[in-house]
Amino acid sequence: MPPARRIRGIALIEVLIALLIFMLGVLGLVGLQATMTRAQTDSKSRADAAYLATELIGRMWGDLTNMASYSGSGCASQTRCKEWQDKVSQTLPRGTGAVTVASGTGDVQVTVGWTMPNGDTRQYVTSTTISKSAN
């Protein structure tokens, strides 16, 4: 009779080891899911920042006569620019937007910044030239 008890005990140990391996796999999948969620949030924020910067450049193309008034981070006097900055702050976590317009050359640099939930700051910068003669 004693050998049968040993066999049953070994089977129980095998089951416990299998459960341990299974649980480690589940924990690994949970960690992977958390990492993927963070990466997806970061990716969405980057895509939103690129879209918002491109949107402002499009607005500037449509408003060539007031292009210099878009420059700076305040732009409170320019309604279209202020609307854009409000959209940046609503779309991105702690989002900010700034525009630099080089007088005379039409060179425009749009900077969109935001802070991720973990505290990391991110920035998207794009540049273009908006020429009045090309329109």
Image (cartoon, rainbow, N blue to C red):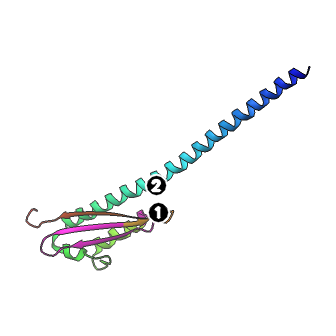
Q: Toward the viewer: 57 or 129?
A: 129
Q: Which residue is mark 1?
A: 116
Q: Quadrant of residue 112 in the image?
A: bottom left
Q: Quadrant of residue 100 in the image?
A: bottom left
Q: Secondary structure at mark 2?
A: helix
Are discs 1 and 2 less than 8 Å apart at CB?
yes
Q: Is residue 91 left or right of residue 104?
A: right
Type of amino acid at the residue the image marks with label 2:
Thr
Type of amino acid at the residue the image marks with label 1:
Met
Q: Is residue 19 visible?
A: yes
Distance of label 1 from label 2 (alpha carbons): 8 Å
Q: Which residue is mark 2?
A: 41
Q: Quadrant of residue 2 in the image?
A: top right
Look at the picture and state if 43 lies above or below 17. below
- Crowdedness near tag 2: few (<14), some (14–19) or many (≥20) residues, C-alpha within 10 Å: some
Q: Toward the viewer: 16 or 119?
A: 16
From the image, which quarter does the N terminus lie in?
top right
Name the disc covering residue 128, or none: none
Q: Residue at x 45, y 51 (%)?
A: 40
Q: Tell me the magenta residue range.
A: 90-112
The location of residue 31, given as percent across then percent down, is 57, 48
